[in-house]
Image (cartoon, helix red, strand yellow):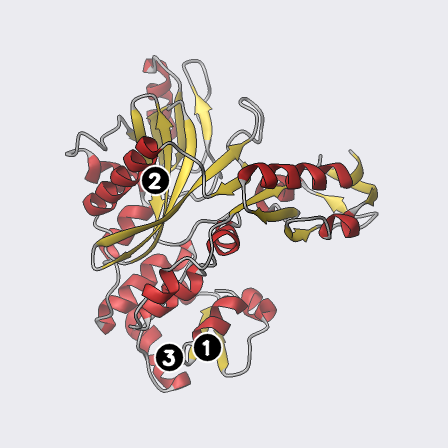
């Protein structure tokens, strides 16, 4: 939950109760008319407890919404209790647990891929002894690029983080599909390209840039959209936002996974900059029983991109150009949180990615030129 989400909910006429950890609530800066419950163990609460708290705090409980992975299952259980149109708890668990997702796809040839669930270190070691190709392995319930790694015969298995999902490496262009579903009808909002780090490098599975919407041939775009709609049907998604990751291979689009929320990595901001569609407002309107059509209609058609800055970890010795870069043509937002003397950590570079620039223009060429202009303007000296 973010302040923006709370503000949009109140604009749509809702009374809002935010339930989250004390640390998060303390920095949320809630707008007037909303309230919060700080509870470090809120994820352990029953749906009945959540509903009772909401009724006591704001006089009712009509619907629950989260746009973060960690509370998806609990939110679905609350909505099932309230009778609110939402994806069932079983479907949400199927999208979180990638082995359950793969199992549900095994009977659909178009979507089926080889996979293996590895429950312990011994199973992983036995799998590596038999592997005859390169596999991509990731935590079964992981998010983002955390724990994702390439393995082949001769490698050592990880010591923790089990269970893992192993799949043969797919080669092709990585994309994501942003969509919105209502009663099983899937509307494709657009396709996003993903730029990853250099193969073999520590950042190879970390996205350092996105472009929305991505330019594909009509045949490729149709194949991707048809595949994603079929996939969402088979998995059982019927409501709300989805962010589905695919590889566009020589044999067509192959689905990696999906999430019942909007995409991370500033994709929500790109959709708004490119189309004028606020996916948070769209999700809220649907959950509150309001007609989503007006919130799903593009206001304009542009191209938007984000580029995350990737300095080497170390101490900042000097930097320049930040203020000038913010006023370059087509720059929508530029965040540069570091000052001279600050320590840039590996976690920030690979995980949090707090420094970024978002640009938007009429064409992809203009977007790429704007990103290059920002990169040329910025200077950063880091002592490792």
Residue sitting nearer the eye, 8 or 26:
8
Query: Viewer-nearest of labels 2 and 1?
Result: 1
Residue at image position (50%, 49%) is 302
Q: Are marks 3 and 1 in contact (CB under 8 Å)?
A: no
- Where's residue 127, x and y in %? 33, 21
Residue situated in front as seen by the camera: 251 or 109 = 251
Residue in view at x 64 percent, y 46 percent: 356
Rendered image: mark on residue 11: 1
- Residue 337 appears anywhere in the view: no
Q: Residues within 10 Å of mark 2 (few under 14, many from 20)?
A: some
Query: Percent x, y for residue 121?
Result: 39, 28
The residue located at (21%, 60%) in the rendering is 183
Mark 1 neighbour class, 10 Å CA radius: few under 14, some 14 to 19, many 20 or more: few
Kindly report the distance in space between the C-alpha atoms of the residues bearing marks 2 and 3.
34 Å
Q: Disc 3 or disc 1, which is closer to the eye? A: 1
Residue under label 3: 53
């Amino acid at each position: 939950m973010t302040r923006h989400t709370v503000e949009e909910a109140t604009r749509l006429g809702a009374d809002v109760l935010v339930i989250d950890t004390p640390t998060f609530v303390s920095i949320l800066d809630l707008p007037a008319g909303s309230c919060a419950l700080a509870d470090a163990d809120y994820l352990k609460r029953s749906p009945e407890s959540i509903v009772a708290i909401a009724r006591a705090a704001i006089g009712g409980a009509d619907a629950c919404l989260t746009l973060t992975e960690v509370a998806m299952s609990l939110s679905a259980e609350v909505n099932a209790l309230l009778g609110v149109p939402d994806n069932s708890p079983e479907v949400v668990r199927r999208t979180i647990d990638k082995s359950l997702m793969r199992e549900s796809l095994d009977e659909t040839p178009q979507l089926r891929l080889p996979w293996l669930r590895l429950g312990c270190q011994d199973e992983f070691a036995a799998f590596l002894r038999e592997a005859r190709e390169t596999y991509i392995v990731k935590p079964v319930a992981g998010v983002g690029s955390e724990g994702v790694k390439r393995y082949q015969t001769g490698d050592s298995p990880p010591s923790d983080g089990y269970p893992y999902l192993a799949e043969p490496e797919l080669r092709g262009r990585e994309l994501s599909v942003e969509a919105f579903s209502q009663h099983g009808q899937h509307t494709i909002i657009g396709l996003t390209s993903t730029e990853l780090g250099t193969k073999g490098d520590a950042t190879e599975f970390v996205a350092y840039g996105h472009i929305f919407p991505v330019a594909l041939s009509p045949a490729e775009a149709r194949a991707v959209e048809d595949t994603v709609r079929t996939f969402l049907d088979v998995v059982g998604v019927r409501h709300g936002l989805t962010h589905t990751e695919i590889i566009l291979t020589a044999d067509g689009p192959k689905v990696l996974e999906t999430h019942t929320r909007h995409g991370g990595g500033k994709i929500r901001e790109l959709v708004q900059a490119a189309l004028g569609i606020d996916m948070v407002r769209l999700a809220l309107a649907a959950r509150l029983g309001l007609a989503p059509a007006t919130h799903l209609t593009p206001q304009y058609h542009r191209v938007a991109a984000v580029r995350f800055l990737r300095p080497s970890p170390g101490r900042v010795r000097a930097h320049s150009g930040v203020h000038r870069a913010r006023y370059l043509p087509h720059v929508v937002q530029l965040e540069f949180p570091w000052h001279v003397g600050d320590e840039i950590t590996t976690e920030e570079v690979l995980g949090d990615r707090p420094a970024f620039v978002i640009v938007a223009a009429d064409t992809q060429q203009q977007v790429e030129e704007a990103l290059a202009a920002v990169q040329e303007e910025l200077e950063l000296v880091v002592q490792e």
